[in-house]
Image: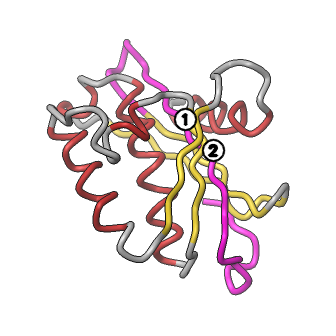
Amino acid sequence: METNNVNSIPPVLSAYVDGSFDKETARFAYGVILLDGDTTVAMMSAADDDPELASMHNVAGEIKGAEAAIRFCLEHGVKELTIYHDYEGIAKWPLGLWKANKLGTQAYRDFYREAVRTLKITFVKVKGHSGNKYNDIADKLAGEALK
């Protein structure tokens, strides 16, 4: 994870999250860029091969990216987070608009419900692969994590 001076993390951040999946290795990954306006606060990415989660393909990475952004904010005392995502389930599962049928979506929903006790979270849907600078960065980070 790359971060700027963690002693000066602002109380309101934005995060762009994205996921990726490699069919050959059955691994998934996430990429996250956390921002204060246009200033990068942190960039994170990681890959995993948990079989239960990997069955959801790139959606697993999308979920883990949102969780990583939320976890960062909780650990650094951030009060408000806006999550920009290109997969609608990132907002719909935690908000109860979609039923969480799989263990991964249930765990994500439950994690969100605990997090919003201390962190205000807003979701904004963006179109994927449409030239959005920060969504493209999150996508690239996710892809690189699979290498």
Q: Is residue 106 above or below residue 18?
A: below
Q: Looking at the image, which is closer to me, 47 or 5?
A: 5
Please give left or right for residue 38 compared with residue 129 in the image: right
Whole-percent x, y for residue 17 in the image: 56, 42
Q: How many marks?
A: 2
Nearest to the observer: residue 2 or residue 123 = 123
Residue lying at 66% horizontally and 56% vertically, measured from the top left: 14
For badge 1, the amino acid type reads Asp
Residue 18: mark in rendering: 1
Marks 2 and 1: CB-CB under 8 Å?
yes
Q: Which mark is residue 16?
A: 2
Disc 2: CA contacts within 10 A as few (<14), some (14-19) or many (>=20): many
**SS class of the residue under badge 1?**
strand
On the image, the x and y values in percent for residue 38 come to 85, 55
Residue farthest top in this picture: 24
Amino acid at circle 2: Tyr
Magenta residues span 1-28
Q: Residue at x 35, y 34 (%)?
A: 60
The image quadrant where one finds the N terminus is bottom right
Instruction: Relative to 144, say whether 26 is above or below.
Output: above
Q: Secondary structure at mark 2?
A: strand
Residue 93 lies within the magenta run: no
**Of residues 97 and 83, the one drawn nearer to the viewer in this rendering:** 97
* Left or right position of 114 against 15: left
